[in-house]
Amino acid sequence: MGSASENLQALIREFYSVWFRFHPAAVLKAGVSGYAGTLPAVRDDDVSALGSWLESTIVGLEEIDFHALAPAEQIDLELLFGACRDEYQAILKRDWRHRDPLAFMPFQTICRLLLDAGGEGQAALEACLKG
């Protein structure tokens, strides 16, 4: 394991290489080459992958010893942490599973299992819940 500075620099390099793949419009605007011809991440799988990666990056940033960094690196860490956190929160707000999780509960199936006239509804429901 490297120093705090080395770990931060590794996360910064990873951040840009991965983030650019998910945000090609920003890359084109910034004039960075190598990412032309890609579309932004809009599919659920892509957005979930981006969210998971941002969450992992946040954890990695939290593990870096802030006080062992030079003042300029401390600013870099704070900026990167804020960018990851803000985008992750935005993803959660747009994610249909987080906006209204109760909408995805199988209430009709649960009711049918509980009201089963044969009396085995409770056992069937328990079996479903156990997987």
Image (cartoon, rainbow, N blue to C red):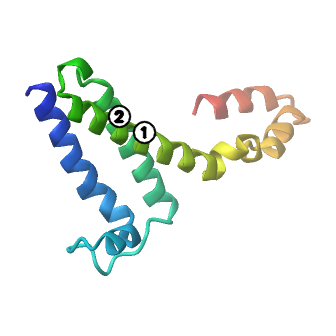
Which quarter of the rendered picture does the N terminus lie within? top left
Which residue lies at the image location 48% right of the left edge and 48% below the top edge?
A: 87
* Mark 2, residue position: 78
Q: Where is residue 79 in the image (x, y as percent from the top left)?
A: 36, 40
Which residue lies at the image location 50% right of the left edge and 65% below the top edge?
A: 43
The dot on residue 97 is: none
Q: Describe the element under mark 1 as helix, strand or loop.
A: helix
The dot on residue 82 is: 1
Q: Where is residue 27 in the image (x, y as percent from the top left)?
A: 32, 69
Amino acid of disc 1? Gly
Q: Describe the element under mark 2 as helix, strand or loop.
A: helix
Amino acid of disc 2? Glu
Question: Viewed as shown, does residue 12 lie left or right of 100?
Answer: left
Which residue lies at the image location 50% right of the left edge and 66% below the top edge?
A: 42
Residue 43 position (above or below residue 124): below
Q: Where is residue 54 in the image (x, y as percent from the top left)?
A: 39, 44
Labelled pair 1, 2 in contact (Cβ < 8 Å): yes
Work out which residue is located at the far left of the displayed protein and give it: 2
